[in-house]
Image (tube, grey):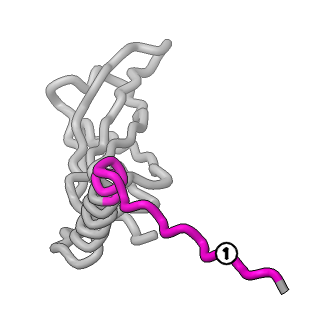
C-alpha cells in the first residue's frame, strides 16, 4: 500500500478576506436594524390631507386636480375625496395612498373652484 500524503495546511486569511468579512457583517447588521426598526418602531395610522392643485376649464365645467398626501405610517385604501363649492359637492375615490405617499384625483365643478372649494377626506379603509 502506498502512503497517503497529508493535505497541506490552508493559508491564513489575508487582510482583504478579513475586510470583506467585516463589511458583510456590517451590512447584515444594518439591514437587520432597519427591518427591526420598521417592525417594532412606533406606527402612526394613515393621516390624509387634501390640497387643490391645477384648475382648468373644460367646456362648461371646471376640472380641479386634488392631491392627497398620506403623512402617516400606514397605507389607506378606498380613499374618499370630497370637494364642496357653494351648494355643489363633487367626490372621487382613490384605490390607495401608500404610507408617506401621494395620490391624485380630479373633481368637476360648475364654477371656478379656486379659493372657494372646501376639500376633505371623509373616509378610507385599511388594506
Q: From what the image shows, is residue 95 above or below residue 45?
A: above
Q: Residue at x 33, y 64 (%)?
A: 28
Q: Secondary structure at mark 1?
A: loop
Give, as a single range, the part of the protein colored magenta.
Answer: 2-21
- Residue 18 lies in magenta, yes or no? yes
Q: Which residue is mark 1?
A: 5
Give how far across and how far down residue 97 sits, in percent: 38, 52
In the rendered image, the residue lying farthest to the right is 1
Q: Could you tell me how many numbered marks the image carries? A: 1
Task: Give 12 or 113, whichever is nearer the viewer.
Answer: 12
Task: Give 33 or 86, whichever is nearer the viewer.
Answer: 33
Name the main secondary structure of what is drawn in magenta: loop
- Residue 91 lies in magenta, yes or no? no
In-image side of 33 versus 90 (left or right)? left
Give how far across and how far down residue 87 sits, in percent: 28, 41
Q: Can residue 99 be seen in the rendering of this structure?
A: no
Amino acid at each position: 500500500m502506498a502512503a497517503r500524503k497529508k493535505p497541506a495546511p490552508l493559508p491564513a486569511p489575508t487582510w482583504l478576506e478579513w475586510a470583506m468579512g467585516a463589511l458583510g457583517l456590517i451590512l447584515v447588521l444594518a439591514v437587520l436594524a432597519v427591518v427591526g426598526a420598521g417592525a417594532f418602531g412606533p406606527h402612526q395610522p394613515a393621516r390624509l390631507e387634501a390640497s387643490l392643485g391645477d384648475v382648468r376649464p373644460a367646456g362648461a365645467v371646471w376640472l380641479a386636480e386634488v392631491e392627497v398626501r398620506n403623512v402617516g405610517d400606514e397605507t389607506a385604501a378606498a380613499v374618499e375625496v370630497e370637494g364642496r363649492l357653494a351648494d355643489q359637492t363633487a367626490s372621487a375615490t382613490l384605490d390607495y395612498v401608500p404610507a408617506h405617499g401621494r395620490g391624485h384625483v380630479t373633481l368637476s365643478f360648475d364654477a371656478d373652484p379656486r379659493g372657494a372649494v372646501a376639500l376633505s377626506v371623509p373616509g378610507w379603509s385599511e388594506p
